[in-house]
Amino acid sequence: MAFCCLLIHVFLFTCCSAHSDVFTSIGHMTDLLFTEKDLVTSLKDYIRAEESKLEQIKKWADKLDVLSAAATQDPEGFLGHPVNAFKLMKRLNTEWGELESLVLTDMSDAFVSNLTIQRQHFPNDDDQIGAAKALMRLLDTYKLDTNTIATGQLPGSSSVASHRSVLTVDDCYDLGKVAYSDADYYHTELWMVQALKQLDQGETSSTTDAVSILDYLSYSVYQQGDLERALDFTKRLLELDPTHQRASGNLKYFEYQLAKQNKVVEKDEEETEGKQKKGRPDDYLPERRKYEQLCRGEGLRMTPRRQSRLFCRYYDNNRHPKYVIGPVKQEDEWDRPRIVRYHDIVSDKEIEKVKELAKPRLRRATVHDPQTGKLTTAHYRVSKSAWLTAFEHPVVDQINQRIEDITGLDVTTAEDLQVANYGVGGQYEPHFDFGRKDEPDAFEELGTGNRIATWLLYMSDVQAGGATVFTDVGASVRPKKGTAVFWYNLHPSGEGDYRTRHAACPVLVGNKWVSNKWIHERGQEFRRRCGLQETD
């Protein structure tokens, strides 16, 4: 468009000149030559700008071509790495938008039209923030440092180079800003320190500088009560930008507060402006520490005597006709409450069919809201799920029948098969499957009573993370493709078994696919006899 305006300007100038003798003089012609020279210079500037833009676009395209070619060879393996998933969210939500602005010329109509159509499927700001928080969740749960995540060298991650990405200075800075927007100064500090470290090591950035990083750093450490470091960061900032007004004001304030603090050293540090102590922010989950320990494999260990009572066996469910000749392999995972695992319970072909049916319908997983009795999304359950009914495909019906044959429970009153996919940082924090006494309306709409038992089928292996942990008793069950775990949520008396409180740990590396069947009380009267005793 600028080029068109430029030609119009020349044309108008020439037309006007033709009607005036003054402009035919040598002096005027000389002026015209210099005018033309200026115009050529402007034209070359325009061409250089266009070439520079095209070169940027070409570099971007070449980089993405290599990345997407490698990624699409093994999409699940590639997206199983949390850094890849975060960077995909960031690219689609932020960087493609920047590219759109760059490419918006009169020659880019086809691209822009395509981008506009595809953009409706792009992640939004909330998705990018969610991916950022997932990285922080992994950082905390598995006691990783920011450099481990930034370099992509996660425990259990693939050795395939194309599956491993690194976080740039800009990425770390953006992660710090996400934490800062939530007043999470602990994680703000961690990621800003990492961004600064990478800058100091020679990494370059066209959008993020040390001054901006130090500005966030000084305030975040101050909010955690570390005045000395806040002062050091502020001094370093002012060395780089002596005119920074906020830093100049903060310098005086920090010096005053530090002097004041030094005069009353014997007083409790909590008196310093009431600032929070350094460390992770307060948590709403009382068992957070135990939950994360179990996720890291640091749970309780059974005594040898208890362990000796756990067995593996061939199981035919009291000589069920289907399993007398070909019994299933059953393994005791825990004794109190009893948790058993069934091996080779579904085939790879069946798993792929279930995933194929579920994928088009995957939506953000919901939980039962005890206040409203409705299903709603929750920050403590991060996964996508879909529900499959028995009549949709013979494979679903076969799996349902297999669950009934093995457990001996009636599945006609059970909920539909729920298929869930846990991607980057996907988790489900500690919860009960059954409705408690303070939830009298739980599952009322179903009219089938409480959830008596849970069948959890693992449809994928997970390279790292993703265990199912029982926080009350310290049990941890690792995902293993083709196996299923089963436990009762209710005692024979009908009372809830609070030892079954469990959680799905965040997926560190990999892609976790599960399907679960929640079996309800109605229809089990002659299959699992009621009793006054609390345990089987």
Image: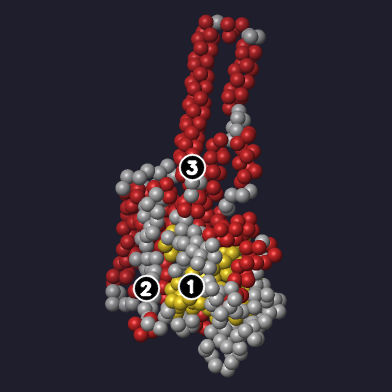
Identify the disc placed on residue 329: 1
Please tell me whether mark 3 or mark 1 is closer to you in this view: 1
Residue projecting furthest to the front: 325
Give the residue pinned by disc 2: 298
At x 46%, y 84%, the residue is: 336
Q: Earlier in the sequence, mark 2 or mark 1?
A: 2
**Residue shown at 61%/90% (left/top)?**
530
392 displayed left or right of 84: right
Q: Residues within 10 Å of mark 2 (few under 14, many from 20)?
A: few
Q: Nearer the viewer, mark 2 or mark 1?
A: 1
Circle 1 SS class: strand
Name the residue at 61% across, 6% down: 21
Q: Mark 3 or mark 1, which has the lower sequence index?
A: 3
Q: Nearer the viewer, mark 3 or mark 2?
A: 3
Q: Quadrant of residue 353?
A: bottom right
Q: Residues within 10 Å of mark 3 (few under 14, many from 20)?
A: few
Q: Is residue 441 left or right of residue 206?
A: right
Q: CA distance from mark 3 to mark 1?
A: 41 Å
At which x and y percent is residue 297? 38, 71
Q: Nearer the viewer, residue 313 or 78?
A: 313
**Residue projecting furthest to the bottom:** 532
Q: Circles 3 and 2: CB distance less than 8 Å?
A: no
Q: Is residue 376 visible?
A: no
Residue highlighted by disc 3: 69
Q: Amino acid at mark 2?
A: Glu
